[in-house]
């Protein structure tokens, strides 16, 4: 049986510590300090409540395991990532899905998190219900924090119904034209000469929207284009081979990227946050969410 | 009974006037009285000077002067809040955003609008008419409440079931912090790198700083909208139908329940054509592309039939649709017409447990000899029981409080939370410890203090402090009724 108590004991209350999931983005935001003790969050699915559309899951669970269980009830969560990625790692990285327009953001999907703080104490952020305005929005801070504020043990995530039908099309329409000619497509990607569009929903609707796009030369393809591994913010031009995610302004590209400059006033709040949550800097030392390019 | 103005007030007022102009500062007893409360039950607030800045710089001036004089500051929108968030404690400078009501920029192509915090929610939607876009959050107070207030309370509304509450529609926000500096949180497109400070600020109930400019995301109008009115023998049947609809794997645009007492009040007030003999009615709105909407209408009818639905009225046109919604949106107004006083609660429970929780809530009200009415956002389990009472009857207030506390406990025991959309403010401070441990609260405190290390932004809200609000804390316990 998993317990937060065991995870808390593993994390302890002193000395640098980092938490590892599948290690698929281990160096994002800086190399982990080699002196830091490596710990692992528990794994396993506590309960999937399809009628409530939530799932309670331990942070060490792989996304693949979770997706399989949810698919049995024709549901999914927003999280995605390479094989081996875990729920905790994915939330800590906190990127957006390319299907964000349908499925929403990771931040909107994290309803509750149970964490171990730098002082080695367990705290809970958020609540189990799909709507909640009780206290401060701690969950949002945890998503994308690279484990620098707290280490997550167990979470409750919002689930969504899987679409009945899902279709990708590609063609020379501009993203703006695509957006104008269909209703809330799940994804629009732009590779500099072609738009790649994902339509999802009921079969008949998807078909009729696809027919409309076909009149503009869009053709059905097997799936999204291969996304290059590096990420950058859209700044107006698209390098060769890069793909822009229109909804999130993220450019998927090859080659090293640099973190954008951040307003010192924003950095000041971030520094105070880090100090308040982790005065000794023991959680995931070496990592800095402001060293990510997009 | 006149209350003494704290020492140093004349200097404070003089500095505020010097900074932003005499026409933007109201320091008389009338203004301070008017701004001492919001739409909640909470009485006993004490306002210092009330400022009406017209720009971000002027907000920063107000904050700077307030802090220099050792005063707190309280941001305020339209004062429609129901948890006392805008109620001033300890004679703070009240920063009212009513004159920051410009819609600065609408970018139809990128579906973004920059607005002042004082823009009234419905004014933005009206302004967008004809663009094919709208601002999705639609609190029932949308004719009066401001987008700054919506942001600070992370407000919801009927259509937030499918589209998400305010946070999902705020891309970026310019904020004046308690050190009078200005900072932009978030990005117009996508996420800002680093911590989600935008997401942390939304829902901060004015305790993290003052929102001075807001970039909201605009949502395309759906091509097809169908509104259904289902009636049931009992509210329990209606609640079971809601659970069934969600379980069937569809996410309607809206799912709203009104019980028989509310239906009767509404019918007298607006004649929306609701059936008077039904135990409860359920409004279901489905939107999207035509085939999907048609399929979902059938699913809703089937789930309704499984739960003993009486009639299913499908709005034939826009006029009928609007009439169905007019009833729902005027429910509080209608109730205000018939009740001497009422106290509106706001809790959330798992939507799979709606029916049993409503039975418990109704039983609790009955035990305390109070009338309860229910009108609520059923689709996300957000209950709004209204306790009706006559404060002139001796002992009534005690019963209202006892029942209110039971309602909160029932929600928490069912796996729910304290508030779905009205926030904690002053009203629910004392219940925070029912839901959160001291360690949970310490983590929330760490967030709050990172934004406002000086502790000057709307203090005494949200956290269960022993500190009283002003010198009449006893009075905060006296419900005065929500008149809307
Ligand atoms: C909505 C969404 C969509 C995404 N889509 C894609 C995609 O299409 N393609 C893609 O490549 N990636 C995508 N990602 C990112 C991907 O999910 C992550 O990079 C994931 O692979 C990292 O998982 P991991 O277990 O390997 O983490 P690791 O590499 O082990 O760790 C990554 C970071 O998270 C921290 N961390 C790990 N576990 C915890 C924990 N329990 N508590 C606190 N911090 C922890 C680590 O310390 C480290 O800093 C997406 C992410 C999200 C949120
Ligand atoms: C009849 C009625 C129906 C209602 N229906 C709903 C509903 O369906 N859904 C719902 O969610 N709520 C509802 N409410 C509650 C209320 O209308 C909302 O909370 C609304 O968002 C408050 O907006 P306001 O402008 O009136 O804010 P105020 O009441 O003035 O302030 C609310 C809080 O926001 C803070 N604040 C205001 N402006 C700013 C700013 N610019 N920067 C920082 N903080 C700020 C204040 O300090 C305070 O803590 C209803 C209220 C009434 C009276």
Image (cartoon, coloured by chain):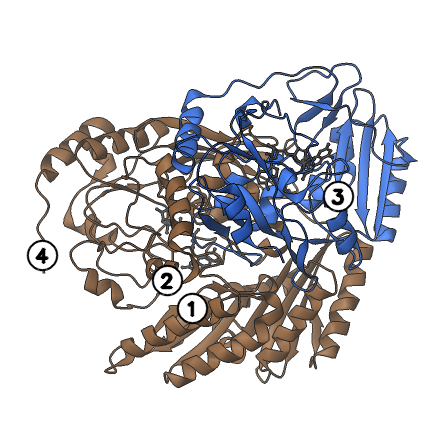
Is the Cβ of the residue at disc 2 closer than 8 Å to that at disc 1?
yes
- Give whichever of discs 2 and 1 has the lower sequence position: 1
- Say if residue A174 shows up in the picture: yes
Residue A192 place in picture, x, y as percent: 79, 20
Crowd tier of the residue under label 3, counting other residues whose Cα lies within 10 Å: few below 14, some 14–19, many 20 or above: some
> Marks 3 and 1: which is nearer the front?
1
- Residue B166 seen in the figure: no
Q: CA distance from mark 3 to mark 1?
A: 41 Å
Instruction: Check residue A183 in the rendering and tell me which mark sits there, or answer none.
Output: 3
Residue B112 left/right relative to B29: right
Colour displayed for chain B in the image of the structure? brown
Decide: few, some or many residues near mark 4? Use Cα within 10 Å; few <14, some 14-19, many ≥20.
Answer: few
Q: Is A200 rendered above or below residue B262? A: above
Instruction: Give me the residue at 83% from left, 29% from top.
Output: A225
Q: Is residue B135 left or right of residue B403?
A: right
Q: Which residue is mark 4?
A: B2
Vertical arrangement, residue B475 with respect to residue A216, above or below: below
Q: Which chain is blue?
A: A
Could you tell which of marks 1 and 4 lies nearer the N-terminus? 4
Q: CA distance from mark 4 to mark 2?
A: 32 Å
- Quick one: label 1, few (<14), some, or many (20+) residues within 10 Å? many
Q: Which residue is mark 2?
A: B431
Question: Which residue corresponds to mark 1?
Answer: B408
The lab-note entry on whether marks 4 and 2 share a chain reads yes
Where is residue B343, by image quadrant?
A: bottom left
Between marks 1 and 4, how big is the CA–CA gap? 36 Å
Can you tell which of label 4 and label 2 is closer to the viewer? 2
Which quarter of the picture shows residue B456?
A: top left
**Mark 2 falls on what kind of element?**
helix
User: Do the residues bearing badges 3 and 1 touch, measured as CB atoms within 8 Å?
Assistant: no
Q: CA distance from mark 3 to mark 2?
A: 43 Å
Mark earlier in primary sequence (4, 2) = 4
């Amino acid at each position: 049986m998993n317990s937060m108590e065991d995870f808390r004991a593993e994390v302890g209350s002193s000395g640098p510590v980092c938490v590892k999931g599948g290690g698929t983005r281990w160096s994002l935001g800086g190399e982990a300090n080699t002196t830091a003790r490596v710990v692992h969050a528990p794994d396993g699915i506590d309960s999937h409540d399809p009628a409530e559309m939530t799932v309670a899951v331990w942070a060490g669970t792989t996304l693949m395991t979770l997706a399989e269980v949810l698919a049995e009830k024709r549901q999914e969560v927003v999280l995605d990532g390479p094989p081996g990625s875990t729920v905790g790692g994915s939330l800590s990285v906190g990127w957006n899905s390319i299907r964000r327009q349908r499925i929403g953001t990771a931040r909107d999907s994290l309803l509750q998190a149970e964490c171990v703080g730098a002082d080695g104490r367990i705290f809970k952020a958020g609540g189990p219900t799909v709507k909640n305005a009780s206290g401060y929005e701690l969950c949002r801070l945890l998503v994308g924090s690279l484990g620098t504020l707290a280490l997550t043990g167990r979470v409750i995530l919002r689930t969504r119904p899987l679409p009945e039908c899902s279709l990708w099309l590609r063609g020379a329409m501009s993203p703006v034209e695509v957006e104008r000619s269909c209703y809330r497509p799940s994804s629009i990607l732009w590779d500099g000469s072609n738009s790649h569009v994902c339509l999802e929903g009921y079969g008949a609707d998807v078909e009729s929207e696809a027919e409309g796009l076909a009149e503009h030369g869009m053709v059905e393809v097997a799936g999204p284009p291969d996304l290059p591994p590096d990420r950058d913010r859209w700044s107006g031009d698209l390098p060769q081979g890069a793909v822009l995610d229109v909804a999130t302004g993220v450019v998927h590209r090859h080659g090293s990227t640099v973190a954008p400059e951040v307003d010192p006033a924003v950095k000041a709040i971030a520094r105070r946050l880090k100090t308040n949550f982790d005065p000794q800097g023991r959680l995931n030392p070496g990592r800095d969410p402001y060293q990510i390019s997009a | 009974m006149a209350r003494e103005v704290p020492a140093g007030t004349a200097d404070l007022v003089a500095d505020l006037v010097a900074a932003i102009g005499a026409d933007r500062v109201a320091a008389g007893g009338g203004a301070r009285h008017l701004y001492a409360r919001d739409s909640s039950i909470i009485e006993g607030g004490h306002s210092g000077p009330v400022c009406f800045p017209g720009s971000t710089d002027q907000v920063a001036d107000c904050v700077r002067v307030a802090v220099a004089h050792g005063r707190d500051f309280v941001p305020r929108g339209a004062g429609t809040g129901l948890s006392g968030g805008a109620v001033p404690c300890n004679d703070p400078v009240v920063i009212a955003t009513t004159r920051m009501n410009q819609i600065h920029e609408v970018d139809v192509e990128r579906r973004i609008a920059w607005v002042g915090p004082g823009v009234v929610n419905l004014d933005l939607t009206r302004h967008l008419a004809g663009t094919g876009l709208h601002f999705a959050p639609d609190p029932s107070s949308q004719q009066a409440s401001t987008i700054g207030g919506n942001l600070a309370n992370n407000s919801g509304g009927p259509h937030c079931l499918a589209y998400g509450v305010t946070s999902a529609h705020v891309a970026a926000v310019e904020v004046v912090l308690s050190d009078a500096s200005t900072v932009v949180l978030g990005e117009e497109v996508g996420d800002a790198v680093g911590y989600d400070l935008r997401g942390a600020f939304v829902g901060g109930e004015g305790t993290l700083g003052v929102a001075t400019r807001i970039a909201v995301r605009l949502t395309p109008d759906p091509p097809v909208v169908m509104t259904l009115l289902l009636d049931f023998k009992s509210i329990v049947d209606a609640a079971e139908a809601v659970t069934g609809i969600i379980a069937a794997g569809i996410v309607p645009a809206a799912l709203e329940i009104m019980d028989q007492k509310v239906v009767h009040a509404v019918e007298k007030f607006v004649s929306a054509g609701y059936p008077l003999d039904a135990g409860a009615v359920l409004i279901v709105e489905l939107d999207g592309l035509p085939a999907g909407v048609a399929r979902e209408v059938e699913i809703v009818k089937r789930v309704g039939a499984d739960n003993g639905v009486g009639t299913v009225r499908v709005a034939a046109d826009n006029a009928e649709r609007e009439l169905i919604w007019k009833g729902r949106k005027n429910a509080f107004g209608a109730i205000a017409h018939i009740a001497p006083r009422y106290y509106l609660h706001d809790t959330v429970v798992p939507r799979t447990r709606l029916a049993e929780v409503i039975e418990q809530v109704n039983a609790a009200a009955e035990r305390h000899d109070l009338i309860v009415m229910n009108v609520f956002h059923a689709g996300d389990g957000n209950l709004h029981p209204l306790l009706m009472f006559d404060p002139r009857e001796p002992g009534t207030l005690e019963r209202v409080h006892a029942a209110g506390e039971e309602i909160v406990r029932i929600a928490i025991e069912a796996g729910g939370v304290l508030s779905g959309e009205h926030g904690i403010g002053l009203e629910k401070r004392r219940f925070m410890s029912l839901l959160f441990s001291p360690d949970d609260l310490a983590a929330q405190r760490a967030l709050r203090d990172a934004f406002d290390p000086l502790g000057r932004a709307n203090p005494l809200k949200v956290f269960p402090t022993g500190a009283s609000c002003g010198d009449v804390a006893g009075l905060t316990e006296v419900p005065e009724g929500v008149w809307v």
